[in-house]
Amino acid sequence: EDSPEFGSPPKKQDTGEGHSLKVASHYNTLQECGLAERSRSRIVHLRNFNNWTKSILIGEILDKVRRERRDVAVLDLGCGKGGDLLKWRKGRISKLVCADIADVSVEQCRQRYDDMRRRSHPNERIFSAEFITADCSRELLSDKLSDAELKFDICSCQFVYHYSFESHSQADTMLRNACERLRPGGFFIGTTPDSYELVKRLEASDSNSFGNEVYRVTFRKKGEYPLFGCQYEFNLEGVVDVPEFLVYFPLLVEMAKKYNMRLVFKKTFREFFQDKIKDEQNRILLQRMQGLEQYPADGRGRLASDNPVEYHHAERI
Ligand code: SAM
């Protein structure tokens, strides 16, 4: 019987621009809807759930780093429109570098930051920030940073890494950007679709695609899963419809060793949810974010995550 096989050679090599322009223009043209409209959206639960996961992930790593350091510098790799700015503010970091391939998103991120600063209390010390537009799978951030000596305590790469797995060199450059400026003991945290889950669901489907009323994943082909360039389209209620690539996690772990990283932690969103929902503070946060009355402590709540995503962090040694 045909079994899913990772590691078949990619059908095509890196084609220069590859899909980067498509990804950038896709995110650039995504409209920033107001909160009221967004909250009407059917994907609101999924978004809130992802946000809750990121909040906990970022909060926990900041607690850890802060035990050693007072001033914390963070690289938000693939920052998008700045959806995590408030989390960094809450975490009272000192410096944030935001980088993304989509120039319109970077500009919106900058505006959000400027607004946040303008509206903040005069006594609040809000982190300084720098904004960089770059294809982080092809360009080196080191060449673009204003401070050539800057070292990061954390690199956060949320729902971004899979775009770089188009080719080995792109995935490697992305990793280099994530890790080379981490100080020893610094962390690389991230979330990325779970390739095992994606392939499992694909193999169980009788077509090239699977999903539910909220999302749909469409592969080119079943049964062949090259390590790089294994493309699929991800559609989320018409909100995201863009080429992505499978990230075979053990390969990412191996590749990261080149940058002195060792894996500390990896969990699927489901495992993460079931673990973290036991904590009352986390439960209250999720209830508030989801606008719901109650989440059962045993993790059997309305898990908005039929979403095959996993979460990981690694430490620079
Ligand atoms: N991290 C943000 C968040 O969690 O809200 C945004 C996530 S969004 C799903 C993916 C982001 O990755 C987009 O903003 C996109 O422009 C960015 N991206 C994709 N490929 C990239 C690349 N090669 N270099 C930098 N950013 C990239």
Image: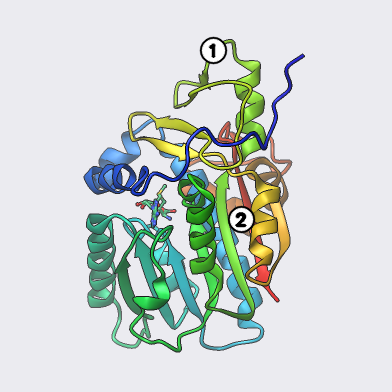
Q: Determine which residue is flagged by label 2.
A: 282
Give coordinates of residue 29: x percent, y percent: 22, 44
What is the three-letter code of the residue carrying label 1? Answer: Ser
Which residue sits at x=35%, y=56%?
A: 80
Q: Quadrant of residue 254?
A: bottom right
Which residue sits at x=31%, y=69%?
A: 132
257 relative to 149, above or below: above
Give coordinates of residue 191: x percent, y percent: 56, 51
Q: Quadrant of residue 238?
A: top left
Q: Is residue 165 visible?
A: yes
Front residue (pair 10, 305): 10
Q: Nearer the viewer, mark 1 or mark 2?
A: 1
Q: Determine which residue is flagged by label 1.
A: 207
- Relative to residue 182, is residue 253 drawn left or right? right
Image mark for residue 77: none
132 relative to 45, above or below: below
Query: Label 1 neighbourhood size at 10 Å, few (<14), some (14-19), many (20+)?
Result: few
Mark 1 vs mark 2: which is more N-terminal?
Answer: 1
Which residue sits at x=30%, y=42%?
A: 22
Give coordinates of residue 158: x percent, y percent: 49, 55
Q: Secondary structure at mark 1?
A: loop
